[in-house]
Amino acid sequence: MSTTASPAAAPASPADRPFDATDYGLYGLTVLAWSLSWYAIALQVGTVSNEVNMVWRFSIATILMFAWVAFSGRRFRFPLADHLRFAGLGVLLFSTNFLFFYYGALFLVSGLLSVVFSLASVINMLLATVITRQRPSPRILAGGVLGFAGIALLFWPEIARQDVSNAALVGLALCFAGTLCFCFGNLVSASAQKKGLPLVSMNAWGMLYGTLWAGFLALVLGRDFIIEPTLSYLGSLVFLAVISTVLAFAAYLTLLGRIGAARAGYATVIFPVFALLQSTFLEGYQWTGFALAGLVLVAAGNVLVIRGARPK
């Protein structure tokens, strides 16, 4: 019998270990919150202006985020240069991005908003290759082609009409602009994190600046600061501020540390499916062969990009 001790097995990395009950719970909360948020946005548009909707939503979220910073003992104070980064984050990620989607909800069912937004993972990788001037891998290029081809199929009935004033095309343009803002906001966030700025504090300040920017736009445009006293409006407002913004954010951050960014990113593949199913039952969305094929292509493109982004 050999007396040499066997080497201890290396612990599984977050990207390789199997899910446990906590992982499934966090993943389910993230996907459910993000899936339902698109319908909640649709319930917000109408009586109250979109700029004021943003003020109410992110005022609540900002208070909760700063409470999180305080109770967790994270940093409050930062130099002016960092606040400029936070302001850029707030304008791009926590106001303008959402404003485009709120306006897009006037033209599209909520499920389609989520499908367009799911292209963020594809656009993020394409922007990263442009900025770093590195040649993208064939997998990322293929994912980008599949993703954009899927969007084209989803909207093909409108495109085939060749009517530039068509509501669906206006909604598509608004949602694409919102997705671009989100992606540029991600670049600001990534740059700040490389500098070592704490993520929770950074997002709390970003939400504050985003709220102030939305308030400024509302004042300039002469919007009325009102609240619609209906259960659907108030319920959707609380859901968006507390569940979709703060709790889902906390769940996703925890998930990132537990299972790795690559697998956590698959949420962007799953939530558009649930969002479109929700639109089918609640908003009368009509499925077509083009729509089904387009959704499959968008999901496949996201999978290719996320797998391609996974570190070796």
Image (cartoon, rainbow, N blue to C red):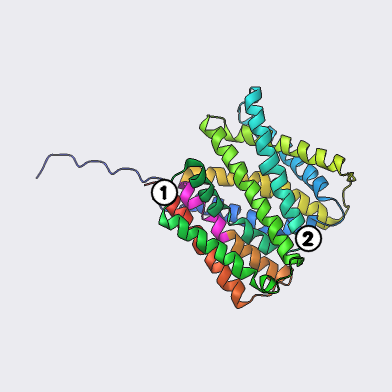
- In the picture, residue 217 is in which quadrant? top right
**Magenta part of the chain:** 259-270
Please say whether residue 154 is visible from this viewpoint. Answer: yes
Quarter of the rendering containing residue 287: bottom right
Q: Residue at (60%, 67%) from the top-left corner?
A: 152
Q: Would residue 70 be counted in the magenta stretch?
A: no
Q: Is residue 248 visible?
A: no
* Image location (x, y in percent) of residue 144: 51, 58
Q: Position of residue 11 (x, y in %)?
A: 34, 43
Q: Which residue is mark 2?
A: 106
**Measured from the top left, where is residue 185 in percent x and y?**
62, 42
Q: Tag 1: Cα neighbours inside 10 Å, few (<14), some, or many (≥20)?
A: some
Front residue of 5 and 124? 124
Q: Is residue 183 above or below residue 109?
A: above
In the drawing, what numbered circle is on residue 99?
Answer: none
Magenta stretch encompasses residue 265: yes
| Residue 33 in the figure: left or right of residue 269 | right
